[in-house]
Image (cartoon, rainbow, N blue to C red):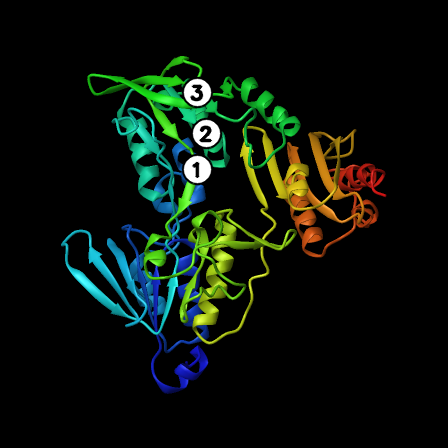
Amino acid sequence: MKSARELSTNKKKRIVIIGGVAAGTSAASKAKRIDPNADVKIIQEESVVSYAACGIPYVIEGVINNFEELIERPPDVFKSKYDIDVIVNTRAHKIDSFRKQVHATDLQSGKETIFDYDFLVVATGARAVVPNIKGVNQKGVFFIRNYSDGVKINDSTRTRDVHSSIIAGAGLIGLEMVEAFKKRGHTGRGDMDVTVVEMADHILPSLLDKNMAKIVERELEANGVKIILGERVEEILGRDGQIKGIRTSAKRDIDSDFIVLGTGVRPNSEIARDAGVELGYANAIKVDEYMRTNIPDIFAAGDCATARNYITNKDTYIPLGTTANKQGRVAGENVAGGNTRFRGIAGSAITKVFDLFIGKTGLTSEEGIRNGFDPVEEVIESITRAGYYPGNKPIWIKIVADRKSGRVLGSQIVGGEGVKERIDLIALALLLKADIRDLASYDACYVPPASPVWEPINIAASQTAKLVI
């Protein structure tokens, strides 16, 4: 079978990409840069492409004026500036890997089109999990995953007299919506009652351990947010077509006229599976480091695909925009004739809740045990600037290391500032398989407006290193 590079010398390469958000548009743009003569097409189910889904809560909060500002490049710009065809409002519903064709349907006209390809990138993303609970399909229940979800929530809160809201699921997007509703509030006055319901025993269960989550819970409560832990939503209550609230697994009834379910996502991998593409962890499309699937000339990237964790060296599924963009670039380069690798992920993530930033990279101790390590950990509380300098804020740092090897395994950081750069530093340490003593002794810079004389990472690592053999 001819490679992408061999094809490029013989004919105009046909590259079809299913999905036009982060991974899809990154793949298309990179492919076109590598092979300007390639015929690149994006098939996109939504009416918009290349938008920043992570910015949706900030439009709803009012920090960003409108949803149009989240669109990096509209479809016509892809064509006029980059010679990339974007077919919007079109659902790809079948991949014929034998004939190398994608069957798609125009959602407005119902017309079916068949697209021939030499190389295919599946970047179909993920969708919100719809829980099997009574009343979930009632008007006034919202999910938040894509552009149209955000628009619906925004329009509803502007046109309805919403006084209270319930966020079911205290993950990243759930807590970002909590702050958006609390600050924007009822008719923009900032007086909306907001309740968070989480089935785990602490918030951000996929990001933080319980002791670190407690810090964030105190911040939420200080800002008037009600938190209910260890209970799940069992029923959406309504009457006469209007949402009235929820009933939890503890048979607790909570009144509300607006409900957002942030109960997780699952990969849109069915179209690939039906074509014979192998699925992997969490039913995401299994890819190698070149973003190739098990079927020649079919690649996958983004929230529909697996990613290799570079601490455990195992496939995982952590759908984040950063990963989607990087995987898309790798897939785009390789379908156009390149030979580049995706180095993997550490699960690095960060969010902001009121005056706190919350970050994680790598493994928790529990995750370390599951992956065959013997983890030790230590938590320190420090400050972000010199103690005498104005604006000083607290910061809490937990570092996890392997007891026997001393290898750094992960970190969780919560603080008023300076969280991202410290999480990024530890993510690099994880990639380089650094020893905890490296983090304890690296030469950190110091200036009173930006740090204390003893860098908090040095302190946390030094304390953790005492537990290493």
Name the residue that disc number 2 marks: 169
Dots 2, 1 in contact, CB < 8 A: yes
**Quadrant for the N terminus in the image:** bottom left
* Mark 2: secondary structure: loop
Q: CA distance from mark 2 to mark 1?
A: 8 Å
Residue 97 at x, y percent in the picture: 32, 68
Q: Callout 2: few (<14), some (14-19), or many (20+) C-alpha neighbours within 10 Å? A: many
Quarter holding residue 189: top left
Query: In the image, is 22 to the left or to the right of 463?
Result: left
Location of residue 152 in the rendering, given as x and y in whole percent from the top left corner: 29, 35
Question: Would you say 425 lies left or right of 170 here?
Answer: right
- Kindly identify which residue carries mark 1: 264
Residues 135 and 389: in front is 135
Q: Is 469 rendered above or below residue 41?
A: above
Total numbered labels:
3
Observer-nearest of 346 and 162: 346
Q: Amino acid at mark 2?
A: Gly
Residue contact between numbered discs 1 and 3, judged by CB atoms under 8 Å = no
Element assignment for label 3: strand
Q: Residue furthest bottom?
A: 10
**Residue 194 circle label:** 3
Q: CA distance from mark 2 to mark 3?
A: 13 Å
> What residue lies at 19% left-to-right and 17% top-to-bottom?
240
N-terminal of the two: label 1 or label 3?
A: 3
**Tag 1: residue type?**
Gly
